[in-house]
Amino acid sequence: MAETAFIRKQTHFSEGMAAGLSIAIGYMPVALTFGLLAGDTGLTLSETVMMSIFVFAGAAQYISLSLLAAGTGIFEIVFTTFIVNIRHFLMSASLNEKVEEDSLWKKALYSFGITDETFSVASVKEGTVSAGYMFGLIFISYSSWVVFSGVGHMIGANLPETLQESMSVALYAMFIGLLVPSMKKQRKVVFLAGAAAIFNSVFYLTGSLSTGWSIVLSTLLSAVLVELAYSKGGKRHAE
């Protein structure tokens, strides 16, 4: 009986790894670029790998690099990361309805590995999702992100100095690459990005806030105002 359960868990783990292979491949270039930029920002190899190990959140890690380069304080970086990743609460709550009942420690362990990509794969799987499947899915995705972050840093360290310095431009290109597809799909995102840019510009020009707090408050204010505008517009449309 115990042997059968063990074999079943192994099967679920293998299924999860197979499902996560495409995510692992997709993470490779993004993680490599992160490693390159982390080295250019001044992080050591160990710091770069440790960030990927303990944070494991692409957008948040890229934003952290930008804030570190601007000399932002640690509290602003942590708070900004929290705001960027607040959607993970919703993803975890949604996925909790689909996963099989299991030990709380297992759920807590694999919930760390929930990203936009792993959530999407797990949520579209037919039937319930086992802990073994989630561990397999996350293991291969997580391993790819951590390993190639380190590889990217090592590659960057061997690049010519002039090329390393120019890599900072890639950080802004990455943000644009993340933003543009969303702007094409939803007009709301266009207003959100525009409002945040205006608020941040005002804070920067007036010198009233530090770079970190400027980004945090710009994000919060734009999100609240755009959401209020859309909710009022929806009510008027319903009337």
Image (cartoon, grey):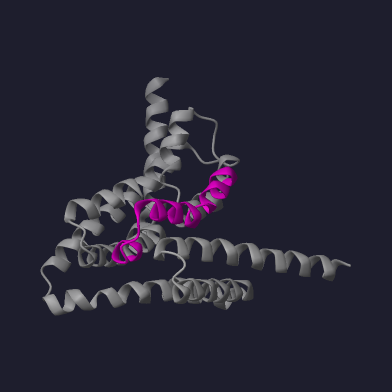
Q: Residue 93: x and y, percent? A: 58, 43
Please, is residue 91 above or below residue 224 in the view?
above
Please, is residue 80 above or below residue 127 in the view?
below
Q: Nearer the viewer, residue 10 or 165?
A: 165
Farthest right residue? 239
Q: Is residue 103 left or right of residue 23?
A: right
Q: Residue 140: x and y, percent? A: 33, 49
Farthest top residue? 1
Q: Quadrant of the N terminus?
A: top left
The answer to whether any part of residue 143 appears in the image is no
Report the residue at 22% width, 78% height from top: 166
Q: What is the magenta segment's predominant secondary structure?
A: helix
Q: Residue 6, located in which quarter of the rendered image? A: top left
Q: Is residue 137 magenta?
A: no
Q: Nearer the viewer, residue 145 or 140?
A: 145
Q: Residue 173: x and y, percent? A: 36, 77
Start-end of magenta stretch: 66-94
Report the residue at 15% width, 62% height from top: 154
Q: Residue 171: x and y, percent? A: 33, 72
The answer to whether any part of residue 71 appears in the image is yes
Q: Is residue 29 left or right of residue 159?
A: right
Q: Quadrant of the C terminus?
A: bottom right
Counting every numbered tag in the picture gives 0
Report the residue at 47% width, 51% height from top: 82
Q: Residue 73, located in which quarter of the rendered image? A: bottom left
Q: Is residue 87 magenta?
A: yes
